[in-house]
Amino acid sequence: MKDSRIMLIYSHYIGESYADDASAAIAKIYSSDKGKTWSERKIIIMPDEHNAKNIMSVSMLAM
């Protein structure tokens, strides 16, 4: 990022299962120290917002 932080956006499983069809949301975290420590997770997309069981496999493009 322009401010030198690292941002990681990833599939975050909700509940107790990690199976392919388990409930999952999209979350983001930041690091300001090259990945040594990370911010608290923030859920940015929940599956129920899109009438879905899970939201996975996010892709990003810097613009």
Image: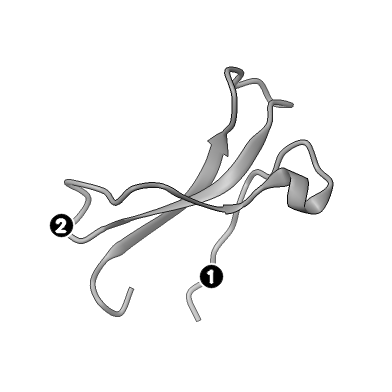
Q: Residue at x 76, y 45 (%)?
A: 48
Q: Quadrant of the N terminus?
A: bottom left
Which mark is drawn over residue 32?
A: none
Dot placed on the residue nearer the N-terminal end, 2 or 1 = 2
Which amino acid, mark 2?
Answer: Asp
Task: Using the numbered discs, state the Cα–Cα distance from disc 2 to disc 1 in whole angstroms.
Answer: 22 Å
**Residue nearest the viewer, comparing 15 with 56:** 15
Q: Residue at x 20, y 46 (%)?
A: 37
Toward which corner of the image does residue 53 lie, by quadrant?
Answer: top right
* Image coordinates for residue 38, horizontal then vertical, percent: 26, 48
Q: Is residue 13 above or below residue 43?
A: above
Q: Residue at x 66, y 48 (%)?
A: 46
Residue most extreme to the right: 51
**Residue nearest the viewer, comparing 48 with 31:** 48
Q: Is residue 61 left or right of residue 52?
A: left
Helix, strand or loop at label 1? It is: loop
Q: Residues within 10 Å of mark 2 (few under 14, many from 20)?
A: few
Q: Is residue 59 left or right of residue 42?
A: right
Instruction: Tell me the residue that label 2 is attached to.
Output: 33
Look at discs 2 and 1 and give the one toward the viewer.
Answer: 2
Instruction: Tell me the residue that label 1 is attached to.
Output: 61
Q: Is residue 31 left or right of residue 14?
A: left
Q: Residues within 10 Å of mark 1 (few under 14, many from 20)?
A: few
- Here the colouring is one colour
Q: Is residue 19 above or below residue 61?
A: above
Helix, strand or loop at label 2? It is: loop
Which amino acid, mark 1?
Answer: Leu
Q: Residue at x 59, y 58 (%)?
A: 59
* Image coordinates for residue 26, horizontal then vertical, percent: 58, 48
**Residue nearest the viewer, comparing 35 with 50:** 50
Q: Is residue 63 above or below residue 13?
A: below
